[in-house]
Image: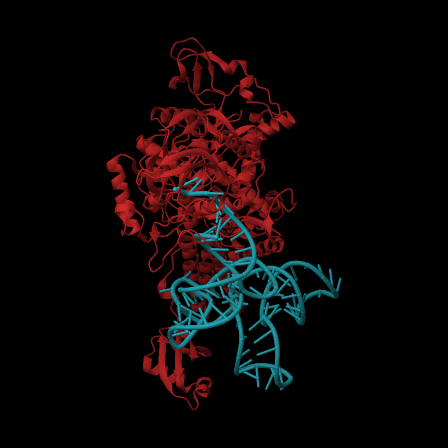
Chain colours: A red, B cyan
Amino acid sequence: MNRLEERYLFNTIEQKWQRKWEEENIYRTVEDEQKPKYYVLEMFPYPSGNLHMGHVRNYSIGDVIARFKVMQGYNVIHPMGWDAFGLPAENAAIKRGIHPAKWTWDNIAKMKDQLKSMGISYDWEREVATCHPDYYKWTQWLFLEFYKKGLVYKKKAGVNWCPSCATVLANEQVVDGKCERCDSVVDKKDLEQWFFKITEYADRLLEDLEKLPGWPDKVKTMQQNWIGKSVGAEVTFKTEAGHDLTVFTTRPDTIYGVTYMVLAPEHPLVEELTKGNGEADKVKEFVRKVRMMSNVDRMAADMEKEGVFTGSYAINPLNNERIPIFVANYVLMEYGTGIVMGVPAHDQRDFEFARKYNLDVRVVVQPEGEDLDGATMTQAYPAEGKMINSGPFNGLDSNEGIEKIIAYMEDKGIGKRQVNYRLRDWLISRQRYWGVPIPFIYCDKCGVVPVKEEDLPILLPTDVEFKPGGESPLKTSKTFLNTTCPECGGPAKRETDTMDTFVDSSWYFLRYCDPQNSEAPFTKAKVDYWMNVDQYIGGVEHAILHLMYARFFTKVLKDMGMVSCDEPFQNLLTQGMVLKDGSKMSKSKGNVVSPEEIIGKYGADTARMFILFAAPPERDLEWSDQGVEGCYRFLNRVWRLVEGFYAKVKDLESNNQALSKEDKELRRIIHSTIKKVTEDIEQRFNFNTAISAIMELVNGLYHYKDNVSENEQNLALVKFGLKNLVLLLAPFAPHISEELWANLGGNQSVHLQNWPEYDPASLEMDEITLVVQVNGKLRDKISVPKGISREDLEAKVLAEPKISKHLAGKEVVKVIIVPEKLVNLVVK
RNA sequence: GCCGAAGUGGCGGAAUUGGCAGACGCACUGGACUCAAAAUCCAGUGGAGCUCAAACUCCGUGUGGGUUCGACUCCCACCUUCGGCACCA
């Protein structure tokens, strides 16, 4: 090899090694029972056509972990693919007349190039794209399997409609009453839609969060809140006219305190209850008013509670009292039964409502040591206490009362134990083109019929029109729409709705295990070998949506016997955002830094180093052009260090002669860097401190170089230091490490080397620096031989002039010694 | 309103189990190299006081209290910022 160029030519180096890695296929993985497996996964991107810094951060983190685990001897699977269906492709079609398929595939090609320029260790043979028929065939197949299991159904429901996207949205996709994607205010519409019965798995989704100690608590709490489990009872009140009014309550112990009932304005019984009495018009007007309000206004926290009397009465099944029935804006049709029993004394909302409309406030749970009076209370008392005014249940502790009253009601057939969830079933149909067609057919004779398995995939047609704001483009395709019924063979029409793209991403991590299978979505053996994902990395914005849907899919597939794991992601790392000038990079703010530009100017290794060095992964990261320069400078510094030595050390073998003080110090730094970097990657994912340790090693090597002569023994130690430096740097800056490794004489890729191990004996120092404190204040630092006795140490400390001057005229009452760390003298 | 996270130099951040606050980097300052600059290398760099200088002393991790020989770290109260949920009966 000739060495004409001493400068760090990142561009040449990076391209050279990327080509070589690809030619030699070094990141290809196959199942291997001899090695422990490790599955590293980064959330796959939507192919927008442009890599942004968030991607760079996500994939840099994943790549460090993947490369590190490979060097540690794991059989690592590290795949990448494309979450390729979705609305932007359709919008591009409308705006620019490009077909969504072409737009998407072009973007994939572009982004794949950008990803490759980062030098990430992906096994590209496992690449999947959710918009490819080979993939969505199996999404359709799974949909039909879910249908067979009774987990898919169609119903008319009040759903969220985004007028701008011209499609329905799942509950989870509505944020503050607005469309998550485009920020338009979402309407309510009554439409026939397809649902997944995710509520059937609510309990398991909740309970199994306990099986995920490797997830951030934040994410688990968010899922917990979203599922929103409440334990209580369902109680049926009868109206005087004989209608059943069933309510859900978490506080059956307060049932003697019910002084009114409330229905949601949308409740179908409202009309019945007002029929023929004098309140009908007033109620109608009220309901109209409430329904006119936008979702956003109705969800505002400070909205005044309002209601009207229906003119009807109900009977409390426990004490047979006659109580008025209201309609009010604070009761939601979507939760529970849409009817609430009003207990003003023990529920703050009911209290506010009762005071406004002069309804009775009756205390039935008395806190200890207090004597609440319904007439004078200024707020509800929602906590526990002793039951009063509750007939046979008087005197019971309210918690006990809950159980007793439920038992009583179950006995009398007026109520039962009931669990309620905030979680709704997952609405998955979308009135859009660029998604997976829902494999169902409408036949006048046979009804709604599933497509036969052998007819999959139902391909997206190409003869469609894209018009702004129109209905589903699929309806414009003649070839698609008309078909024959799989049951009777008669003429029939296809379903034109497509699936929510979150369906696609709910199983892609399984497909990676067996990406080319044409017989099934995957084989169990392969999935069982690779799953679970050992480390999943992505943005916290997916805390609820994607992560819960993927958990749901995994559980269903387990019940179907298709996989063995019941949780897909063992460990989850939620990375922070990349900020510029304190806010998220966005086109509208004009603060976007393009990865392509940075890689072009400094190289991928520098970009990766900076993004890993600037902050620990979970935290938001402030972009700094000067910080990037610093990392570039550091890589140059490494380059010059190794280049300055490699010719001299290349053929040296390390030897073990007597070491000088400087030698021992350098050796100690080398080993402690190995220890620190290993632990920082493995235990904490604190890549920033790992990199700073590597920087210290480089500083240590420069320092050594300046202070010793270049004899063979010293050079051998330098070589040892350089080799370890390059090995430790390899997961972070893979290209420069590969080049330097080759220059140091390595004839196989640095990324296939064993991760270095440190020698604990080399970390030991003969002399230890101890901190000496007087009354907890730092007064001196002393150097003592290792293993000094307590007595000798105390004597030495007391003899130090800096110490003794603080002891003058005082008495030492206590000496605290933390071995090998500190001495603290307590004086009076 | 409820739940959660965070608050440390001029800046990004470090301090892993209650034991040297400010590692590492950026920025800045001085020096070396150079005709000069860039690059590079070396050194300094929390604040205040004192000093020719060194040494030394005091203050200092959002605020106020507490526990402890010792607190960025633990406890209590509060302030600010960010994120999630928000009539969920």
Residue A37: % across, % down: 35, 42
Extreme-bottom residue of the structure:
A809
The answer to whether residue A29 is seen in the rendering is no
The residue that appears at 42% across and 12% down in the rendered structure is: A485
State which quarter of the image contains the C terminus of chain A. Answer: bottom left
Residue A793: % across, % down: 36, 81
Front residue (pair A256, A200): A256
Left or right placement of residue B6 versus residue A255 in this view:
right
The residue that appears at 48% across and 33% down in the rendered structure is: A265
Front residue (pair A813, A236): A236
Q: Is residue A33 above or below residue A733?
A: above
Residue A700: % across, % down: 50, 64
Q: Is residue A484 above or below residue A208?
A: above
Corner quadrant of residue A332: top left
Corner quadrant of residue A419: top left
The answer to whether residue A626 is seen in the rendering is yes
Extreme-front residue of the structure:
A278
Extreme-left residue of the structure:
A411
